[in-house]
Amino acid sequence: MITRPERYVIVAAAAEGKHTLTAFDSALLKAGLGNVNLIRLSSILPPGCKEEADGINFPPGAFVPTAYGSASSEQEGETIAAAVGIGLSENTFGVIMEHAGKCSAKTAEEKVKEMIREAFSNRSLELKHMEVKSTEHRVEKAGAVIAAVALW
C-alpha cells in the first residue's frame, strides 16, 4: 500500500535538560512532536500537500513521517542550531532540506536555502517559493534543537 500525505507542518524548537536525550524530548514537546513516533523520511513534499496552519494534534504514539534535522550537546556555552526548509515549484512537488549542528540559526538557514536551490537546479525545476524555520540554543548543561516537517 502506497500512501501520500496531504498535509504538513513545519516546526522548530530548542530546549535545555539534564541530559541530551531529555533535552531532545523537551524540544520535541515544544515542537508539538513529543508524544508521537517519528518516522524519518527523506526530502520530497508530495504534490498538493497543504500546510496545516492550526498546528498539529496527533494521537499519542502515532507514527508520523517527518523530515528533520537535530543536534544536541553537553558542551557548556556551545551554540547549536537546526533549520528546515521547503522549496516549492509551480504545480508539482516540493523539496525539503534540513541542517543542524554547531552553528547559529542564521548559518543553518543559509545552508538550507543553498541546498534547496541546488536540489531544484539538479531537478531542472524552477523554484517559486521557499519557507525556512530555524532555532538556536546556547547550551547550559545539555541542550537540543530540532527543525522538522511532519507530514500526514
Image: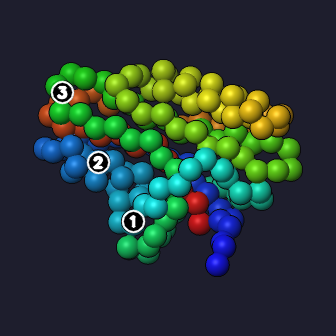
In whole angstroms, how far apart are the C-alphas of marks 1 and 2? 13 Å
Whichever of labels 3 and 1 marks the residue nearer the N terminus, that label is 1
Circle 2 is placed at which residue position?
24
Answer with left or right where residue 44 lies relative to residue 16: right
The residue most toward the right is 91
Q: Amino acid at mark 1?
A: Asn
Q: Residues within 10 Å of mark 1 (few under 14, many from 20)?
A: some
Observer-nearest of 9 and 126: 126
Could you say whether the residue bearing mark 1 is in a helix, strand or loop? strand
Answer with left or right where residue 43 lies relative to residue 106: right
Q: Quadrant of residue 128?
A: top right
In whole angstroms, how far apart are the C-alphas of marks 3 and 2? 15 Å
Please determine whether, in this image, residue 149 is positioned above or below residue 106.
below
Q: Amino acid at mark 2?
A: Phe
Q: Quadrant of the C terminus?
A: bottom right
Q: Are marks 3 and 2 in contact (CB under 8 Å)?
A: no
The disc placed on residue 37 is: 1
Could you say whether the residue bearing mark 2 is in a helix, strand or loop? helix
Circle 3 is placed at which residue position?
75
At which x and y percent is residue 30?
37, 51
Can you see residue 11? yes
The residue sitting at 70% across, 28% down in the picture is 117
